[in-house]
Image: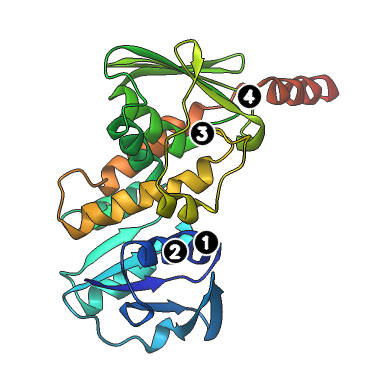
Amino acid sequence: MNKFLIVGSGRRVQQDIIPVLEYIGCKNKDISVYATREKKILVRDSIYDVFNFEKLKYIENDTIVYIAVPAAALRSVIELVLELNSSVKLIVDTPINSATVVNRFRGYNISVAEDAFFLGKYLLDSNLIHKNFSLLTFYKSAMSYHGVAFIEVLLSQILLSFSLFGLYIAICKKGVAIIFGKKNYEKGNIWLNTSQLEFPLLSQREKELIGGLSNRDSVSSRFLDLKRIGLVYLINAVISNSSETIALSDGYRHFKKSKSINVYIFENIKKYLKKALLK
C-alpha cells in the first residue's frame, strides 16, 4: 500500500479524501496530513494529527501527495512539494483555472482529482449509461467544470457548446447534453433520453462510503456523495499508473468549457436589464 501525504485539512479532506483512502485500505499510519497550522481532526471514527506544512522536509518516492488547497495557493504548494521530491506522484484538486499552472508543471507526474469524471466511468461500468448516441438532460444538477467532465466521460468529447437563454447545449461525439437551471443538486435531476438516470446498485461498503441511502435518492441529489466512489476509481488509477488519469491540461480545458454554463440564465438577464435601466 502506498503512503499518502495530504496538503490541506478542510471539508474536502475530512469528508471525501481520508474516507476514500480508508476505503481502499489505508491505515492511519499510511496517511500524513499537513496544513498551515497544527491541530487534530476527527474523520468519522478516527483522529488524525495535522502537521505544519512549513516543517515538511522530506517526501519518500513511494508517497502519493494529494494537494487540497484553494486554487490561488495551488502553484506555490506544488512548487514546494516538487522542491522536496521532483519525481513524486501528485493529485491536485479542482478547479484548474490557470494556464500558467498547466504550462509551469507540464511533464511532471500530476493528476487532477476530477472525481465527477470517474463517477461517470463507474456508471458506464455499471451499464447505467447507453454506449450509443444518447441525450443527457441536467436540471439544476451540473456544476461548471464537474458538469463538463461528467458529460465528456459519458458522451465523449464535446465538439461544440453554447449557452442561450438559460440553456447550455453541448454536442458531443456520442450524444447531446443540455443543462438548465441554477445548480442545486438536491432539487435537481438528470435524465438519460426520456427517463431519470438510474441510481446505481451499490455494495454495502459503497453505501457506507457515501453515508447510507434513503428512499428518495437520485444521482443528482446524492451527486456529491457518489463522487466519493469516483474518487476511489481515480486514486486507484493513479496508484496503478493508468493512462486514464486527468492531466492538468484536461482539467483546465474542462474549466474553460464550463465558463458559459449559466452565463445567460434569466436571473442574470434581469440584473443586466436593471443596470441598463438605471444608467
- Disc 1 crowd rating (10 Å Cα; few below 14, some 14-19, many 20+) is some
**In the picture, residue 183 is in which quadrant?**
top right
Q: Earlier in the sequence, mark 4 or mark 2?
A: 2
Check disc 3 and report the residue beneath it. 219
Give the percent coordinates (x, y) of residue 239.
20, 60
In the rendered structure, which amino acid carries the disc numbered 3?
A: Val
Labelled pair 4, 1 in contact (Cβ < 8 Å): no
Residue 98 visible at all: no
Query: Residue 185: x, y in percent?
Result: 60, 36
- Discs 1/3, front: 3
Mark 3 crowd level (few <14, some 14–19, many ≥20, 10 Å Cα): many
Picture quarter with the C terminus: top right
Identified by mark 4, the residue type is: Gly
The amino acid pointed to by label 2 is: Pro
Marks 2 and 3, Cα distance to the nearest angstrom? 20 Å
Rendered-image quadrant of the N terminus: bottom left
Find out whether the residues at labels 2 and 3 contact each other: C-beta distance under 8 Å. Answer: no
Callout 2 secondary element: helix
In the image, residue 124 sits, relative to residue 84, either above or below, namely above
Q: Residue furthest right?
A: 278
Question: Which residue is under mark 2?
Answer: 19
The numbered mark, 1 or 3, whose residue comes first in the sequence reads 1
The residue shown at (40%, 62%) is 74
Q: Residue at x 41, y 39 (%)?
A: 255
Disc ID at residue 15: 1
Q: Say if mark 1 contacts mark 2, CB within 8 Å.
A: yes
Disc number for residue 181: 4
Say which of marks 4 and 1 sits in front. Answer: 1
Q: Nearer the viewer, residue 250 or 138?
A: 138
Quarter of the rendering containing residue 116: top left
Which of 264/216 is in front? 216
